[in-house]
Image (tube, rainbow, N blue to C red):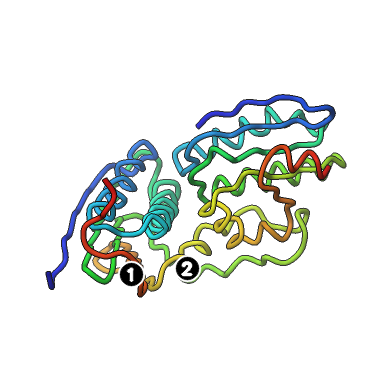
Amino acid sequence: MELKCENRGDIRVVHVAGRIDGSNADAFGLALRDMSGGGNHHLLIDMGAVPYINSAGLRAVLAAAKNQQKHGERCVICGLSGEVREIFDLAGFLNILQVYPSVEEAISHW
Amino acid sequence: MTGGVTRRLTVPATLGHLEALTGMVTGLLKEHGFPEKTIFEMDLAVDEACTNIIRYAYTPGEGEVTLECTVTPTSATVCIIDSGHPFDPLAVEPPDLSGGVEDRPIGGLGVHLIRNLMDTVTYEYTGGKNILCMTRFRKPGEQSGESDHL
């Protein structure tokens, strides 16, 4: 599992790659928190290279969204694969998070 | 083939062994030509159940987890056995999925995913052991027999 980030204007884009399961979800949550900029930027989480996520990974995404909201900043998700999108759906996350197919589409709809 | 093929693995209950557990299940399902979607869902159900056991069933660093995976032409079943504290995941209340980001509780999603992704889930506590069994049937039209993928 790897995270990389870049700034696109006032949007912090975090690119996530790899499987997020019980063995690394805590590390994912910590890395996401470090990279999200402490609520000083809008946050776009690019999950285009994530083939798999479990509930602990979802919790980390929810925690990031809560933190963004607390600071009055947005948290948007993009790039979900079919299976990962189904897990987001089952968890009810598609009702509470904005999701776009790609980084470019997310930014163009900002 | 009328019977099933069973594979069994016992490992120490640590997160470092999680990949061996999920890998055994996904490997067996792949060998028997289950669809990618079923393999993904079984992978997730085993990950969720085993992560719970590893985190909460024992004093950290103690105990073992045993996994038995049986595939037949019509189904895949995984039974997960531990000797930790009695815990019935089926008794866990479904999470409240209404409300916005701020209201959404952190947690409770793992069991919810298992219940939604598996066709049957049974739990028993017997002889000092938690036994959780999860089955996913092959749906009509799903690929069966050996995989065509090379």
Chain containing mark 2: B
Q: Which mark is residue A84?
A: none
Can you say whether A81 is above or below B110 in the image? above
Q: Characterize the local packing of mark 2: few (<14), some (14-19) or many (20 or more) Cα atoms within 10 angstroms.
A: some
Q: Which mark is residue B115?
A: 2
- Say which residue appears at 38% left-offset and 55% top-offset: B36
Chain containing mark 1: B
Read off the residue under disc 1. Answer: B138
Q: Quadrant of residue A37?
A: top right
Mark whose residue sits in front, 2 or 1: 1
Amino acid type at image mark 2: Arg
Can you say whether B4 is above or below B52 in the image? below
SS state under label 2: helix
Residue B120 lies left or right of residue B111; in this view the side is left
- Say which residue appears at 38% left-offset and 73% top-offset: B120
Q: How many marks?
A: 2
